[in-house]
Amino acid sequence: MIKILLAVMLVIFCSAGYGLLAEKMLKLKPSGFTAPLGFVLLLCTLQLCYYPVQFFNGSVYWIYASSYLILGCLIVYSLFHIRELFKRYWHWNLCWVLVSFLVFVAVFYHLFIDIGFSDSPMYLNYIAQNIDNQHLNLFNLYSGQIGAEWDALYLFQGYYHFGTFLCHVINVPSTLLGIGGQIDNIVISTWGLGMIYSLISSMLIVNFAEGLKIKQKSIKYVLIAFTLFFSNFYYWRVAFAFYGNTYRTLLAAYLIYTAYCWLRDKEEPLKYVMMFIVGAGLACSSSYLFISFAILFSLAAYLFVSQKTNAFVDMSIIVLPMAVYAVAMFSRNKEVPWIAPTLAIVFIAYYSLRFTKLMKRIIEKIEEFFFRYGKFIFFILIPILMMLFSAYVNFFKPDYLYDYAYYFNNHQDYDMVKDYYFIYSHAFDNILNVIRWFGVILILWKAHSEEQKYIKSLFVMMLILFLNPLATTAVAYLIASNVFYRTVEVLFNPFTEMLIILAVIQWLEQREWLKQGLLLILCVEILVGHIASYLNSDWGLYTFHVNGGKTVNPIVKISDEEIEAIHILEKLIERDQDQFNEEHQPTIISHAEGVRTFLPQVYQIFTARDYYYIWNRVDWIFYDLARRHYDWEAPATEDYARSCGYLDYYNVDYLIVQYWENPEFDEATESCSVTEMITSKFKIKTLVK
């Protein structure tokens, strides 16, 4: 763990230096902690270097080389400016960050990552299987089957390749020099990347509060405490802090905050910071494409309606990373192969000719058109067209899944979002929802400065288009698919929630006892959210994951029995390594979770994903025979005499069977396998061929 902590501190140190460099180069006003800006720039720079190897499925050693070079340069720069960095960080606000970090570590120690039913195995496998891989991304992220890329949505997230680099570099002293023991990939990925998220998010939240220039310290401190220890401790921001997806909301908040400061302070270089934030967000999560689109669409609408000079050019700078990402992603679209080259030609033509007289005249005409008709187009025409298209899909394509009713599903049951509509929230959450929506109304009612009018415009756009239940079917159909509801994070995120609560507090300025009552409610929410999590209460912030944490090793995040079974399998594969080559990976059926994080070279025929996504199963009957049988399911009725035939057909080499959950499969495979080891929960078997 010490090596992981040192690596995390080194990343934060480099990020702080990079942020300081950016402030100097862009001539930005000093704005608190520099590490959040630096980390955004680091992700953006790495992603730019990673694109070629991602695009051509090259060797991961390109990832290693470019990462070493960039981080090496940043270490040198940061060391040269260490005194300046020390002065910037040696103040009381650092205490917020350190306390938040310690609470994160303490809480995460007790949580599990739900590796059997979440996206954890996909992301952990993505990181692990790319280590020392000669053909980046040429495998199925869940099963590990090599030879073909998986979904294009996951191919160009450099954040996970940075995670691969982190796993590599932390284990270099052990693998090359024989110094210390090797640390498991799952430990580096969950703890290392999780710690980085905790530190970066905490610094950014403190920067938000300082950037709002709140005069009354008690209000500022309560807002920081609430956002740090409540909003930033929703279960996925702790248990899944290592996900790139977790940065989605944080970087959405950072993008809105930067736009807010850009309009308030008239600091033109901030538009370049927004460009970098978009690039970093896309390097972390494909969903950020849609989230940033919603934010920037709203920003463009505001700029055109307010007739800001150079609105079109400014927006074209900010969306540049989206253009690059769109070309990369569409390059994998085999059904419509002309989209990527067409977009590439259009983007290259625009950005290379932007300063020519002809292009300037075209831009002027575009701006004149949107200055004149922007309010009608953005706030009336487009929402009406989207509502009409939604009606068409709902009435004439009844099989489409994401209809009007889907909007009102309990999305927090299966995704990393909250319910803000009073439908599925408990009473304590709904107290906050009342405060949130009242604050939204106040911002819509009382906005007067330019930056407040922008936030008002953003909220209006969310409510009439991206979160309008009459329009979201069209949003899902044309842009966002099943995750359209995630745009609620544009309305409610760490920065906008600060603004919303501050608006309520300011409205209560003449009602001192109500204002103090509101601040007390926020403090009580923090305490109840954490305490209730350990009392098996629905009011807890991470109750389910605390309960699950009692069944796993607190460091490795899977059970000791599973770790034991996986290590036995590892020895068996080493024993039989002469049997395997590029044409035949070690092929397994496993009831133990997290196998591929430890053994990324194996092909696991059935994974956690097959439980939910039935169309992914290589064979439905084989799946029903070989899978785990859970307590809540009906008794098995399959013909288990067919088990050995299926194992032979799919050329399976090893089994890890949880024999008390599927005793029928265990018994049926005795005739075609050799039991190598029996643990308290598992039998590890080698197939006889």
Image (cartoon, rainbow, N blue to C red):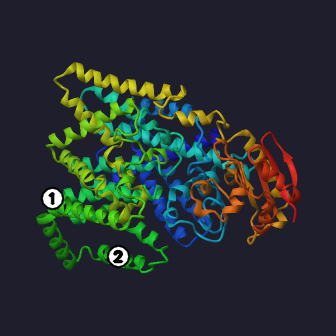
Indicate which disc residue 23 carries: none
Q: Secondary structure at mark 2?
A: helix
Can you tell which of label 1 and label 2 is closer to the viewer? 1
- On the image, numbered disc 2 is attached to which residue? 348
Q: Position of residue 616 (x, y in %)?
A: 60, 63
Left or right, 4 with respect to 645, comes to left
Indicate which disc residue 305 carries: 1
Q: Position of residue 472 (x, y in %)?
A: 33, 57
Image quadrant in which the C terminus is located: bottom right
Name the residue located 88 percent from the left edge and 58 percent from the top edge: 671
Give, as a three-letter code, the residue at label 1: Val
Indicate whether 642 appears above or below 364: above
Image quadrant in which the N terminus is located: top right
Name the residue located 36 percent from the left edge and 55 percent from the top edge: 291
As drawn, the residue found furthest toward the left would be 372
Q: Is residue 251 visible?
A: yes
Counting other residues with Cα less than 10 Å from the Cα at mark 2, is it few (<14), some (14-19), or many (20 or more)?
some
Of marks 1 and 2, which one's residue comes earlier in the chain?
Answer: 1
Q: Secondary structure at mark 1?
A: helix
Left or right, 233 with respect to 373, comes to right
